Amino acid sequence: MALYVYSITATSHSRRLDGMTGVGSHAAPLRSVTVGKLSAIVSDIAEEVRPKRRDLAAHQEVQDRLMGDGTVLPLQFGYIAPDEDAVRQALEENAAAYLATLERLEGCAEHHVRASQQDEEPLLRQILEDSPEARDLNARIRSGDQDPQLPMALGELVAREVEMRQQTLADGLVQALLPFAREHLSRPPSGSEFLNLSLLVPQDRESDLLTAEGNLAREIDGGVDLRFHGPLPPYSFVQ
């Protein structure tokens, strides 16, 4: 029977799975497939799994339970192995890499930091205050100057300024937070976001990180939405 695979742990991990069931419409009990020093946490599955709310929550609950008792290599939602032999083979063939990653992630959790421009009005006002060129272009447009190039020139200037200022703020946030992380990963932002950062944070630095996050949230200028999430299973740092 096919197996849904949630995560990989050291065999020495307590793996408290009693009473937990997995994903799927006929949620099966969780169990371990163990090879040497490694164990995969699995449940039987007899269907294609889609990212429904109930199944996403079940997947995450397994990671949270395991993470509470030790280091875990969480798999992304939806990984299905054809049978138990395939799981055993994967553990055997990748044992060195899995053990090295468990050692690298020991005692750490992932924290996400995202920043987006929710309200551009304060930033646009600041650009007009700081840039003589922007003020001049804006004044000419407001006075009725019919030059068709003026709105485009102002728009391009403001767009450059917005991008530059957001990048400067993002760089400052990263530099302020990196001292609390063992590793970090920056992803391309999307939509109105200009920062999408993942931090691998040792447990003994989490309280310091939370204090720093609170200070940064208070210091950020208006119009910026700064969001912190964690501690989370270290999905971004499993290689």
Image (cartoon, helix red, strand yellow):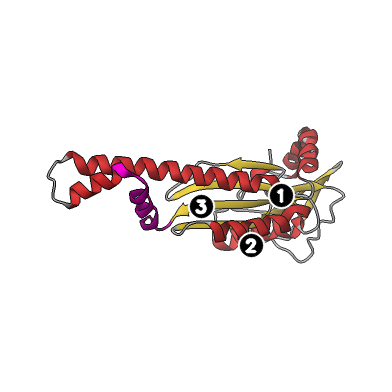
* Disc nearest the viewer among 2 and 3: 3
Determine contact: label 1, label 3, CB under 8 Å: no
Q: Residues within 10 Å of mark 3 (few under 14, many from 20)?
A: many
Residue 207 seen anywhere in this rendered image of the structure: yes
As helix, strand or loop, the secondary structure at mark 2 comes to: loop
Q: Residues within 10 Å of mark 2 (few under 14, many from 20)?
A: few
Q: For the residues marked 2 and 3, what is the alpha-carbon distance in whole angstroms?
A: 39 Å
Residues 143 and 70: in front is 143
**121 part of magenta stretch:** yes
Segment colored magenta: 118-133
Q: For the residues marked 1 and 2, what is the alpha-carbon distance in whole angstroms?
A: 36 Å
In the picture, measured across the screen, residue 13 lies left or right of residue 79, that is right
* Residue at numbered disc 2: 26
**Quarter of the image that includes the C terminus:** top right
As helix, strand or loop, the secondary structure at mark 1 comes to: strand
Between discs 1 and 3, the one toward the N terminus: 3
* Residue at numbered disc 1: 201
* Residue at numbered disc 3: 115
Determine contact: label 1, label 2, CB under 8 Å: no
In the picture, measured across the screen, residue 153 lies left or right of residue 227, that is left
- Predominant secondary structure, magenta span: helix
Q: Mark on residue 139?
A: none
Residue 140 at what x, y percent from top left? 19, 47
Residue at (36%, 57%) from the top-left corner? 121
Q: For the residues marked 1 and 3, what is the alpha-carbon distance in whole angstroms?
A: 19 Å
Q: How many badges with numbers are in the image?
A: 3
Residue 88 seen anywhere in this rendered image of the structure: no
Residues 148 and 131: in front is 131
